[in-house]
Structures are given as structure tokens and as C-alpha cells.
Amino acid sequence: MEIENELKFKIEKPDKLMKEKISDFGFVFDKEISQDDYYFSPPHKKFAGTKKYYLRLRRRNDGTAVFAYHVVINDMQTEELELNCDNFINLKAILTKLDFKLDCVVKKSRQVFVDENNNLKLVLDRVEDLGYFLEIEYMGEMTKETSSIFEKLINHLSLKKNEIVLGSGCPDLLMEKGSINK
């Protein structure tokens, strides 16, 4: 199980200046992808709205999938168990036949930037029905040095603390809005 450290910011549509600042900080464009994330609750327990557990089946562009179980530790950290699957359609069908309940679908397009020197990832998301988000991600133990890099990056990108999305992931935000995209 890995620990992901992530700060998510609700932002206006990213502009050329923001992308220049991302590059100036040392990030390199990695890829642009679209993803559909299907969130489920198991038959014995409701995950939707708990803001604690997430069971996600992510459909990739090529028809493959990532199946993931996440447990939220705090507003910044999540324990993650993930596995790759070569057949999204069959895995979704299995979950349905086993009475897993589809809670919502999060549709997003992403631009991913990496800073390999600091083992950081920066993701610009456009989430259907929610708008734009910027995520700063680091996999591993959060150290003083990593915290300092997060702070410097937040300041460099002119992000504000009140833009941080705390305690809610995109499925929670969609369900609160009443837009669950099933």
C-alpha cells in the first residue's frame, strides 16, 4: 500500500501564464489524458458520502482500467491499493453482478506534468460539471523538505489557501451538487 500526499486546488481555467510558471518551477509536460472514474460501494457498506473510503474503477483511453481502493488518512494523505486490469468492461460487469452499487461517475480530462528531481506530479484537471482543479502530488513519506517544496510551489503558482479543497474528492463534490453522471 502506498501513501499519496496531495493538495487539490479549485482554480479558474488555467491560462498560459500558469503553464509557464509550472515549467519555470521545473515541471515537464508528460501527457494529456481523459479518464472516466466509476465509484462504487460494496453491497455490505455505503462508501458514497463517507469521504473516507473510495472504490474506483478508472477507464483509460485504451480500454484498460485501474481498479483502486483508497482510504483517506487526513485532508492531504490517502492510502492506496491499485491494480491494472486489461478489460474495463468485464471488470465493471463483474462488480455489477456482485451487487456493487455505482455511486457516481467522474469524467475528466487531465494534463500531467512531472518534476522527476523532486518526485512530484502536478495535474491540471477539467472535471465535467465541476470545473478546473490543480493537484500537487507526492508518493511517499512527507518530509520537511517535501513540505517546503509544496509551499514554494503554491507561492510560485500564486495559489491561495482558501482555494484548497479539503475533505472532499470529486465524487463527493459531484454528489453534493446532485450531479452524479451515471
Image (spheres, helix red, strand yellow):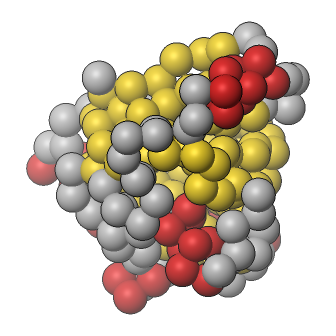
Report the side of 24 relative to 120 (left or right). Answer: right
Residue visible at 52% across and 17% down in the picture:
83
Which of the pair 78/160 is nearer the observer? 78
* Residue 157 position in % (x across, y down): 51, 72
* Residue 61 position in % (x across, y down): 85, 32
Which of the pair 149/5 is nearer the observer? 5
Identify the residue at the far right of this view: 62
Q: Is residue 69 above or below residue 148?
A: above
Splitting the image into 4 quarters, where does residue 34 fall?
A: top right
Q: Is residue 8 visible?
A: no
Report the side of 6 relative to 130 (left or right). Answer: left
Identify the residue at the far top of this view: 86
Residue visible at 41% across and 53% down in the picture:
47
Q: Quadrant of the N terminus?
A: top left
Q: Is residue 40 above or below residue 92?
A: below
Q: Quadrant of the C terminus?
A: bottom right
Residue visible at 75% across and 34% down in the picture:
59
